[in-house]
Amino acid sequence: MASLSITDARGRRLRLENPPRRIVSLVPSQTELLADLGLGPTVVGVTRFCIHPDEWKREKTIVGGTKNVNLDRVRALRPDLILANLEENTRADIEALDALAPVFVTDVRDLEGALDMIRTVGRLTGTVRRAAELADGIAAGFAALPPFPACRAAYLIWRDPYMSVGADTFIHDMLYRAGFVNVFGHRTRYPVVTPDDLRAARPDVILLSSEPYPFRATHREELRAQLPGPAIHLVDGEPFSWYGSRLRYTPAYLMRLRARIMAGPAQTSA
């Protein structure tokens, strides 16, 4: 790889003279992407939320969480590239990491942004061909999705208080591609919503995500007691919010989920 200059989501220019050999990833979905790009020996540090691939939790150094990075651990790893994200990591941590190594910061809010990120990480790591193959395969999978009947949906990511998603989020774009009309699409980021807000929004279905809050059947019944009208489904949060190579599996998941919803009331998670 020749000398490379790339601008990240902060507008900060990143310059690499050689392919990185010691990468620290602070973004779970991008950690999995690095594995799928064949960069296992190159990745030296990940967060405790980087659960894919499973064996990396034992093989790599854990540098803390996404919101509380252990800077001393990162420094000790002597990274030559750090992957971070505007939403998943704190500004203070990112700025502190800038003093340790080149930091490439992403901000992925839709499928096109995810595909661009995958290709850019390929350029950064000298895996352009493999990254292009992944991105092209993901794009083809989404392009093959059939048109779905419109379904008004509220997607909840948190409990006590309930929090949903606005239009400027990656989850919103995944909802759209599955034919869901986000009833809080007029809001931004992750708005707090009440049962009264949900009732007034008149969703056909409420989707309770497995992450970041791990909704369970008891929480579904709790909400159903307050909102007996809409169907309430437990859903896997990864297909809706992981914007790396895991997107390969998202179209098939969205197909299964829509089939479940069309089949009637849910009793188990999708």
Image (spheres, rainbow, N blue to C red):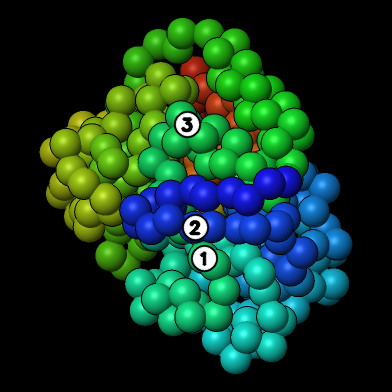
Q: Residue 100, relative to residue 171: is it above or below? A: below
Pick whichever of labels 2 and 1 is earlier in the sequence.
2
Disc 3 marks a residue whose amino acid type is Leu
Q: Judge left or right: residue 93 versus residue 146.
A: left
Residue drawn at (39%, 51%), measured in percent from left and top? 9
The alpha-carbon separation of the residues under discs 3 and 2 comes to 23 Å
Neighbour tally class for label 3: few under 14, some 14-19, many 20 plus, Cα within 10 Å:
many
Residue kind at label 2, given as amino acid type: Leu
The C terminus appears in which quarter of the rendering? top right
Instruction: Give the residue drawn at x 46%, y 23%.
Output: 178
Q: Are marks 2 and 1 in contact (CB under 8 Å)?
A: yes
For label 2, the crowd category at 10 Å Cα-Cα, with few meaning under 14, some 14 to 19 and many 20 or more, is some
Out of 113 and 158, give the one closest to the viewer. 113
Cα distance between the residues tagged 1 and 3: 23 Å
Q: Nearer the viewer, residue 52 or 85?
A: 85
| Observer able to see residue 194 | yes
Judge whether 136 appears above or below 20 on screen.
above
Label 2 element class = strand
Residue 149 point in image, percent of width and height: 40, 11
Task: Give the numbered dot on residue 14.
Answer: 2
Is tag 3's residue or tag 2's residue first in the polypeptide sequence?
2
Q: Is residue 194 left or right of residue 9?
A: left
166 to 46, vertically: above or below: above
* Kind of residue indicated by mark 1: Val
Instruction: Tell me: 2 left or right of 170.
Output: right
Residue picked out by circle 1: 103
Pointer 3: what residue?
A: 111
Is residue 235 shown to the viewer in this render? no
Give residue 81's position: percent from left, percent from top: 62, 65
Q: Earlier in the sequence, mark 1 or mark 3?
A: 1
Res. 77 mark: none
Circle 1 sits in a helix, a strand or a loop, which is it?
strand
